[in-house]
Image (tube, rainbow, N blue to C red):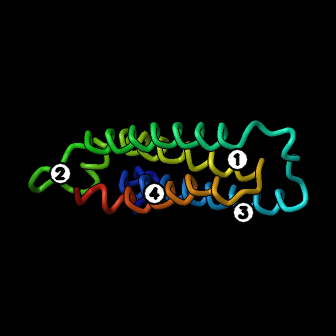
Amino acid sequence: MPPNSPVSPAISARIIHGSLVLGVVLFWLVSWYVAQPTALPVSLLPDRRVLYIGLFLASATLFGAAMFTVNRLSPPARGMSQDDWWRINLGKAVLVWALVEAPTILGTVAYLLTRDFRALLATFTGLLFFGTYRPSRLFER
């Protein structure tokens, strides 16, 4: 590959996807390490039901928006290369991944505040969505 040739859109998609997943995992590990000795007292937090209902509503809305947006990706035409498909759909795929990442990060922040593993449900669900919406699966749709 010549030094001035552009990077393949398929490779760019894999790098972006991997960076987002790695960022979520690293953020969770750092928050787990930080939350061990320093969590807010329960008296300073809002009612946990309010926190969990808010997290559930935000997660459901954003995950639903991601599922709606992924259906708007154009299917690959007959004979279309993977690079051509990614050139057309990379922006939409990044939007889907951002919609999945937001509740994943929110769940991690809720865990950081409460040290309650139930808040990580959004984080684990987001990581499952990241696995479902990985670049190779999006192209196969």
Q: Which residue is mark 4?
A: 130
| Foreground disc of the pair 1, 4 | 1
Does the CB distance between marks 3 and 1 fall below 8 Å?
A: no
The circle drawn on residue 29 is 3
| Foreground disc of the pair 4, 2 | 4
The image shows residue 94, relative to residue 13, as above or below, that is: above
- Between the C-alphas of marks 1 and 2, the distance is 38 Å
Does the CB distance between marks 4 and 3 fall below 8 Å?
A: no
Q: Which residue is mark 2?
A: 76
Query: Which amino acid type is shown beneath numbered disc 2?
Result: Pro
Q: Residues within 10 Å of mark 1 (few under 14, many from 20)?
A: some
**Residue 106 in which image quadrant:** top right
Q: How far across and how far down the image is residue 130, in percent?
A: 45, 57
The circle drawn on residue 109 is 1
The circle drawn on residue 137 is none
| Foreground disc of the pair 2, 3 | 3
User: Is tag 1's residue or tag 4's residue first in the polypeptide sequence?
Assistant: 1
Q: Residues within 10 Å of mark 3 (few under 14, many from 20)?
A: few
Tell me: 140 left or right of 20: left
Q: How far across and how far down the image is residue 62, in percent?
A: 46, 39
Q: How far across and how far down the image is residue 48, in percent?
A: 70, 43
- Between the C-alphas of marks 4 and 3, the distance is 17 Å
Query: Which amino acid type is shown beneath numbered disc 3?
Result: Leu
The image shows residue 128, relative to residue 84, as above or below, that is: below
The image shows residue 103, relative to residue 11, as above or below, that is: above
User: Is tag 4's residue or tag 2's residue first in the polypeptide sequence?
Assistant: 2
The image shows residue 131, relative to residue 94, as above or below, that is: below
Query: Which amino acid type is shown beneath numbered disc 1?
Result: Val
Identify the residue at horizontal 27%, vertical 56% (top origin). Answer: 139
User: Is tag 1's residue or tag 2's residue first in the polypeptide sequence?
Assistant: 2
Query: Which amino acid type is shown beneath numbered disc 4?
Result: Phe
Q: How far across and how far down the image is residue 110, in percent?
A: 69, 47
